Amino acid sequence: MFFYDPQDTSNSVAIKPLTPLELKIIKVIDKDSKSVTSINANEEYTYIASQKGNDITQLKWCFWIDKRDDDFDKEYTIEITATADKADMESDFFLTSKVEGNEDKKKENTKLLKENAILSATITTETHDIGGKQQEVAVLKVKYSKWLDGEKIRVEIYKYNDKNKKPTRNSSKDAVCSRTVIAKPEVAEVYWMAADGEKLEETGYSEDIYLYIKTLGLKDKTLELNIYDDDITPKPIVMENEDDYVAWSGNKIKVEERDSIKQFKVGSKERYENARKDEIEDEKPKENDFLQVNFDFNKINDSGQKQDPEILELYVAVNNATDLKLNSITYQTKFGKLKLTPKEQVVDAFFAKPKKESVIADLPLGKDKNKQDTNKKTEVNHYEKLEKGVIGQKITLVAECDNLEGKDVAIYIYEKKPLLEAKDTKLKVIQNDKEIEKVCATVKDGYAVAEIQLQKPDSAKYKAWDRKLDPDTGDEKSSELYLKVVVEGIDSPATNKAFLKEGKEKFELFSDVIRYDIYDSGKIDKYIREHATKVRYNYFEGETKHRIGRVTFVEGKWIFKDYIYTKKKLQMLDIRDLRSYSNGNIKFNFLTINVSSKHSRFYIDIDAYAAMIAAMIEEEIEDLGYNGFSSKNGGSGASSSHWNGMTGDLRYLSTNKNGETTYLQHTHFDYERQIRFNNALYKFGFSKYYSPTRRKTITMYSENFNRQTIEKILNPKTKKMEQKVVVSKNTSLLPHTEHYRTEKAQHYHHLHVQGFDPSYINEIK
């Protein structure tokens, strides 16, 4: 299949919308030739389309998913091509159901959809009876994956030729047909999770854990789940009792989405008393047992076949599997196996970002206003593990504990290798506004949680660490940290442990600086640091590194009056803090800053600034006149478009190289240099952004003009060469711009810089 890129503007011919009579999907039928309003996954269906004038050449089929554009790449559309029959994926191929603006995840989602959504497809032409006449029609036979369950698939047939290379993507047209995919009822995946989102294989008592269930074809159905203790006894000993049922009053889930997360309060040992007794009894040798003679119980216990009888082996079963027509399983099918241990232990410790998540509460179902079953929801803590942090950042330390409820815990922070402090020195951090090295917390619901700050900004310790992590010479550095957890009052290796010291998991501490590495090849790398307050720009002239400078930036809320960009984090620097650099051939300078105190548009987006100085360095611009981007809060001032530091005005270049006011019609307008500068701006990302709201690529604004130059011309009367202003007869327009002039907005005296594409920056996390 072919992925269509909506940003490809190589064909700029206006597309005339197809009228309903020109191209039409007549019907969608199943294998019995019956028209259908929905589609069963893993079954073949046929789309039949006709073309006015019986011309069915140069046609293509494509699809997209209704109301899911935010989860995929920009205005994605996937062409359907011939696809040999293949098996469905065993696991859900969607990376995530909510990508929350993450462009990398959107691209991955789009790639996975393109590769896995269609299990088979054939495209042919056939002759059908249409309105009593034999007519040749376009035919698509297609089979969809079960993982599209519940999604409305929009299929479009469109003309593909020199004048038209794009589908309309207009669901109101007859050439677009919508059907919802329905999968057979299935419980696809079940497992237990901790509050950090990781799978659980073992847990302790008195904790809150979460049951994750992925289902297909069960929307609006109710799952009735039972929990049992698996009475595992090694052969040849036979169990005396069946698996023990664990009472759970909140054991029902109303399926609202494909993924359900149900809270489960483990409770105390008393809840599992019967199961614990059975485990102990099953392990005891029975009097007069004829197998006793040849059977060594100690050997079995040591062999790994059976663990400590105090450890329960829990699992989940779907009690109403038959009623839900879950043909592949029964009420005895075991899901989500979990060991319940009484052992006191610290299971994990990590740096985290806490946030609230809505889950289905460990409560019985409620009733909605229509007296239908409904889930009761609750907000719970979710601890997202972090692998990186910066000095000065507020961060959360989390220790995951089993059977230590109410215990006091001490957490210490160390460096793996000494950089910030001497070897084996406990790092001092801030807790409750005090500098400490022993971080204190108390276990609640299985977690000891403490919020700290990795030093106070501008303190002596912060400045010392900053100089070591981001030195004035050499490369940026980081220090890997690990945690040591000690449970007060318990002397045991299980409660006195180090985490993040070995293995794949790690946490790196950086300076609070976002770094841009700009290359003369045209590439810009951005090293992202969450919670950063400063930005550094480096320029690489071949192998030579130029440290352009480091400044503090301001952050704020994105102003959604910007109708070009959809969403971006507001981070801007003051142009006055880093207006020039010069070392050999690497140089730039905003020579004049022409910003009124009324509007104070000194601020430019830190991404856009990287691209701007890259273009200036490429053409060695040291005489640029800066007329303003945005105010400190991202405001536009008197303009209607200077929002968020992404759009601004620059003076045209002058042959006098003094940053003076320059019109397109002035004889001192440096036309040749301006062309090169415009090309450099385009090279580094301006005039490239495709706006979904405008459905076009945003280009910079200038105006059509007739060049005026001073030339030496022979005076026929005096027979002498004289300088005269010559006006070109040919109208010009600067590259990568469009003519834009209204009564209020003229662009003959400045270049309106816009259309910067943030995706041009290569983000490295």
Image (spheres, grey):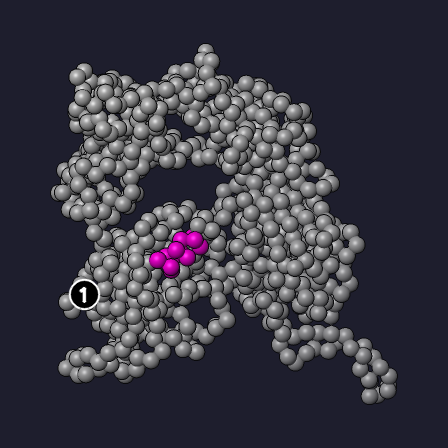
Residue 217, image x, y percentages: 22, 49
Q: The disc labelled 1 sits on which kind of residue?
A: Asp
Residue 689, image x, y percentages: 52, 59
Say if the magenta span includes residue 109: yes
Q: Return the residue at label 1.
A: 30
Q: In percent of the image, x 39 and y 55: which residue is there?
A: 112
Asked where in the image residue 310 lies, by quadrant, the reply is top left
Q: Is residue 127 above or below residue 263?
A: below
Q: Is residue 330 above or below residue 502?
A: below
Q: Can the viewer see residue 117 in this picture?
A: yes
Q: Secondary structure at mark 1?
A: loop
**Image quadrant occupied by the C terminus:** top right
Q: Can the viewer see residue 645 in this picture?
A: no
Q: In percent of the image, x 17 and y 17: which residue is there?
A: 288
Residue 576, image x, y percentages: 68, 45
Residue, far front:
294
Q: Is residue 452 above or below residue 23?
A: above
Residue 516, image x, y percentages: 63, 48
Asked where in the image residue 55 lies, by quadrant, the reply is bottom left
Q: In percent of the image, x 24 and y 34: which residue is there?
A: 316
Say if the magenta span includes residue 498: no
Asked if residue 399 lies left or right of residue 465, the reply is: left
Magenta range is 106-116
**Image quadrant occupied by the N terminus:** bottom left
Between 202 and 140, the one lying in front of the other is 202
Between 400 and 338, the one lying in front of the other is 338
